Each structure stands twice: as structure tokens, then as C-alpha cells.
Amino acid sequence: MNNTFINSFFASVIFSLICHVAYSQEMVNIHPENENRFLVRVKQFNEFIDRFNYKTDFKGNLIDSSFMTAMPRGKMLASLFDFNDTRIDRNGTGYSQEYSENVSGFINTVSKDNLIIDKYSPSIIAEARSRVTYHGKQHIISVYLVQEITGNDMVKWVILDVSGEMLDFSEKDTTNIRFISPGSNETDFINLKRALRDTGYLQYYASENYTPDMLSIFFYCIHNGIITFDYVEDVTYHILDIPGWVFKVREFNRNTLNSGWLITDLSENHCTRKDYLLSLRHNDR
Amino acid sequence: MKKRISMRMKWFFIVTAFMLCVAMAGQTKTAVTSKQAKIVDEINLSPADIEVFKEQTKQKVDEFQQYIVTLGSKDEPSEKRNMAEKEALKLFYKGAEMEISYIQPDGNVKKVNRPMEKYLARLKSLPYTKVLIRFYDIAYISDFTKGPDGRYYSTATIIQEFTGFSDDEIIYKDITKKDIEIIVDLIEDKFFNEKRWKIFLGDIKATETKVAAP
């Protein structure tokens, strides 16, 4: 993505806004520039989906032929990427040809095949990075949520998983110092008490195949007041709905036309949601 | 013999026809019953209803903004400000919270959560003699989605410029983006003895965007 594209994007935006007149609700509109900036801003994730699907324009109106002329779908899709990403800045030091080609390829595929995101898809994972308090100290965890359709057209968000360094019990023993010895059975496992006093390494005494259920641990800790949930710091959406791809969307709070909910990363993906989530948890460590 | 057979055939047809009629009547009754059950179970909003609610949502948000202006202005009589506080609270669903994000000088974001009653009460203690709120006519309202409780949920996003005055001097100015949860609930109207859809405001996430040029 280069300066020519960015300039033509802004020109298209201004042209499409001129086509539709806007008025401030207050008596005096002294900042029309601000108003246009906020019109173009992707104000909600819902709006991101509608723009991605080429359903609504910058004013939330259904896209018509004049808008299509000023802003074809490919341009609209390109506008949903974070322009400050150095990987797509040809003149920057962080430029990545491979990533730029991926982005172009993705935009071409989505436009050509007219692919859209299902708003209530179970392949949209919301990662709510959150602050919790544990033993008086603040920690960061990620809570993963997806939408679930219940009954007739009823939707709710459900917690799928949780990850965070403080919840990580998956570290494996490589030193063979901590174990329950063979023959322990003959003394009715007297050393079990000693093992379970070794509270920092309990998972070493579990089976090789032991996989902790983080969500159950989290619920248990919240229920017993061991962890207090403070607030959600930010939300990133991982969208696996376009076959062969995964992209992340988060909110950019800045005073430019390219702001709001934007694509921050794109990569090829052939994993199921379950495996993708597992990879997110591993990256969190 | 022929006559006997044809009599038998006649009775066979009559009995069969009778049984068919009974079965069909039963089926029709069942079909009507299940259709009624479907209507009762699925009180869905039509696209026309949804457009009406989008308009009403804008009005509720405007109303809320007007109450904030009254609450934040010390120039207004205290009786009027107290009434604004009470009326503003009526707009909200029980348990609604206000979350405010501040951009700190080091660039980090700090978040503060307050129950709506506390937020409105704090507005009254702001040090401004007058408050001016300008908001852009760009309220974005998302689609209404039905929740498992049968209520409809949406989000309205508004951008507002807030200016606080001490007499004629501007002492504070900012631009804030507010994401307001909207809840459409079926409320019983005891006077008219019927149920009506009513719009409530829910949680609000307020994010400081930038300090506007004075």
C-alpha cells in the first residue's frame, strides 16, 4: 500500500461524502473536518463487518451505484487495513513485500469471489485482554469469547477459553527431580502429601498427557475469590470466517481518517477454530 | 353377489371418507395450534419496527445528552438539576454502568467504572458554571439482535465535544466517543392492559479521543 493509494483513498472518501450532505445536530457546525473524520472512522465492530461486506457506506446507508463508482469494494477493503502498519509502507524501513502481496491477494480474492463475513459466525473469536487481581497484584489474562445462536435467531456471547501466564500449569518437567517414585504404592503413597505440598510444580506429578482446563481453573478462582476481575483493557477480534485466511481487528483511537476498528494483521490459516485457539494460548506464554 | 359387493364397497368408501375427515380435522387443529404457539414464542421485530426503534434510540440518546448538560451546569437551579438526574436515571436499565477511559500523559489508558447513579451524581459536583455539549449528527446504530431473554440489543455510537466553562472562561474541553448499549424490552402497560416495546439505555463505554483545539 503506497502513498498514491492513501491519497486516492482520501479523495474517494471526500467525494463520496460530498455526494451525500451531512448536517450537525447542534446549532453550529464549526468543525466539519472533525465530523467527516468521525464519519469515516469505523466506529463499531458491527460497522467494520458491514463495510467489509460492502453493505453500508461511511454514513451507514446501503451502498448505491454512485458510491460504488467512487469506492469499489477493493478500495473499501483496503481502507479497512491499518495504514500505519510499517509492513505495507513501501517507503518505510519495515516494509514487507511478502506481507503486502498477501494483503493484495486477500483483497483480490474477497472482491473477485464476493466473499462476506457472517456477522454471527462462530469463527469470530473476541479476545478480551483483561486485568485481574491475584494475591493483591494485577495480572493480564485473555478471555476468548464467541457468539452462540440459541433457539430462534437468539444470540449471546459465551466464554470459550482463558489464557494467561498466571494460569499456565502446562510446564513439563525436564529435570526428573519431582516425581512419585515406583514402589510408592507399597507404602500407600505416603509421599503423595509431600508431592502436593510442592505447590509450584503440581503439574509435574500429573500424567504426560495432562492438559489443564484453563476455563475451569479460572471459574473456580473467580468463584472462590482467589482472582478478582477488574476490567477489559482492549478487545481484538480474530476472524477465521474467510476460507484460508485469518485476520485480526482492533480499535485504533486516533485523530485521522484511518481510525477505529481496522485490520491489524493478516495471515494464511488452515487450522480449525480449536487448533487456532490452542496456538493463541501457546503464544500467550 | 354383485349387489352385495357394491354395497360393501359403498360402506367401505363411506367409512374411509369419514375417517379421513376426522383425521384432517385433527391435523388442521394441530396446525392452527402449532402456528399459534409459534407466534407466541417468537415475538419478532419487523424491519419497519426496527427502523422506528432506530429513530427512537436517537431521541433517547438526545434526551440523555440534554440531561447531562443540565446536570453539569451549576448555573441551573438545583431543583432542575435534581430532576434531570432522576429523569436521566429512568432512561437506563437497572445495573447500567459508565466506563470512562482516560489517555494518560504517558500514553497509557486508564479505565474507571461507575454505576450510572454514581456517575450522574458526580456530574453535579463538576466545577463548571456552564456545560456545552456539541455532538455530531453521525450517531451510528448497529442492527438489533435478539438475546436469549427475548429482548433486542443494539449499540449506538455518538461523538461529543464537551466544553466546561467557569463563567465565560473555557476550563476544560475534550472529544469523547460514547458506545451506548440499547435494550428493547416488552413492558407491561397496566393502564392499557397490554405489552409495549420500550427502549432503555444500558452500559456506556466512553473513550476520550483527543483534546479539541480551543
Image (cartoon, rainbow, N blue to C red):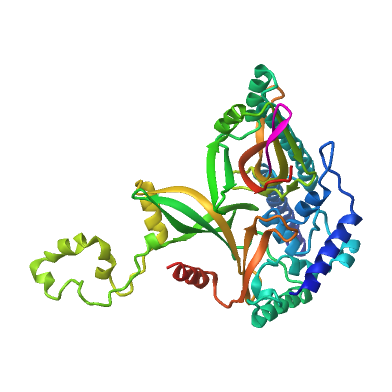
Residue A2, placed above or below residue B71:
below
Q: Residue A171 in the image: state x and y as whole percent.
A: 33, 70
Q: Quadrant of residue A253?
A: bottom right
Q: Is residue A117 visible?
A: yes
Residue B46 position, x and y percent, is 76, 46
Main SS class of the magenta portion in the image: strand
**Count of numbered labels shown in the rendering:** 0
Which residue lies at the image location 67% right of the left edge and 75% below the top edge? A92
B108 left or right of A82 in image? left
Residue occupying the point 33% across, 74% down: A209
Q: Foreground residue, B149 or B114?
A: B114
Q: Quadrant of residue A110?
A: bottom right
Which residue occupies the foreground of this view, B103 or A119? Answer: B103
Q: Is residue A181 magenta?
A: no
User: Residue A218 or A189: which is nearer the viewer?
Assistant: A218
Say left or right for A19 vs A190. Answer: right
Going by the picture, which residue comes out furthest to the front?
B169
Q: Quadrant of the C terminus of chain B?
A: top right
Tell me if residue B26 can be seen: no
Q: Position of residue A235 (x, y in %)?
A: 57, 57
Determine the residue positioned at 40% across, 63% down. Answer: A165
> Which residues make up the magenta segment?
B164-174
Quadrant for the N terminus of chain B, please: bottom right
Residue A164, compared with residue A87, is above or below; it is above
- Say above or below: A80 vs B66: below
Residue drawn at (90%, 63%), measured in percent from left and top?
A65
Residue A7: x and y, percent? 81, 68
